[in-house]
Image (tube, grey):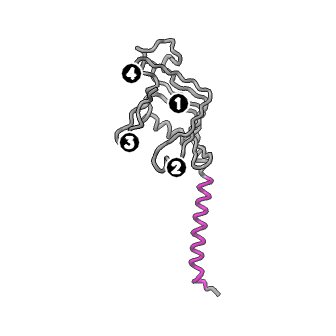
Amino acid sequence: MATRRSLLPLKIIGITVGVVLGLIVMALAALPCLLDSPLPGKVLMRLAPRFVDADLKVGDARLKVMSYPLISLELDSLELTYPHGRFSGLASEDDEGRGDMADTLLSAGKVRLTADARAFLKHREIDVSRALFSDVRVYLHRYDSTSANWMVLKDTPSDQGDTSSWGPAHV
């Protein structure tokens, strides 16, 4: 017959496994609350000025795990504008997308960007594998050989490593 002293290690292992499983269940239960919170939109709005030289407005933002490792960022609305005066010497007032205070580059009713979470966790890269837009309006204007309204991406700071594939958009 087993003594109480010989059962003690089994009890400790059982309690440890129970606590770990309980923490995993609690994390899985909390995950939908974290993903469907205002946090993704706040993070997006905080990071956008580092990469885009334009005004970004987004509606509600949610992260959804479709099937791991694919994760999607869903936006209820998206509007990318730049100050009206930026191309005032080059643009004509009847160009589509021009407004009184700001000119629209992109407007969309709903946006879904899907990326591989593993690539982000391993390499800190966001590799968008799918982009879906609904109710899209895009106003692209090339004014001369050196300026176009879609050149709103900022150059990456030199401390971010390899910049061979980063820089302003070219069409």
Q: Residue furthest right?
A: 1
Q: Residues within 10 Å of mark 3 (few under 14, many from 20)?
A: few
Point out residue 78 in the picture as x, y percentages from the top left corner. 55, 30
Q: Earlier in the sequence, mark 4 or mark 3?
A: 4
In the visual, does 94 lie left or right of 160? Answer: right
Which of the numbered marks, if any, corresponds to residue 162? 3
Q: Earlier in the sequence, mark 1 or mark 3?
A: 1
What residue is disc 1 on? 57
Which amino acid, by three-letter code, is at mark 4? Thr
In the visual, does 1 lie left or right of 171? Answer: right
Which amino acid, by three-letter code, is at mark 2? Arg
Q: Residue furthest left?
A: 158
Predominant SS along the magenta part = helix
What range is drawn magenta here? 3-29
Q: Secondary structure at mark 3?
A: loop
Which quarter of the picture shows residue 28? bottom right
- The answer to whether residue 144 is above or below residue 154 is above
Q: Residue furthest bottom?
A: 1
Q: Residue at x 57, y 74 (%)?
A: 12
What residue is disc 2 on? 118
Q: Nearer the viewer, residue 53 or 141?
A: 141
- The answer to whether residue 128 is above or below residue 10 is above
What residue is disc 4 on? 146
Label 3 and label 2: CA atoms lie apart by: 20 Å
Which amino acid, by three-letter code, is at mark 1? Lys
Point out residue 96 in the picture as x, y percentages from the top left corner. 53, 16
In the visual, does 99 lie left or right of 18? Answer: left
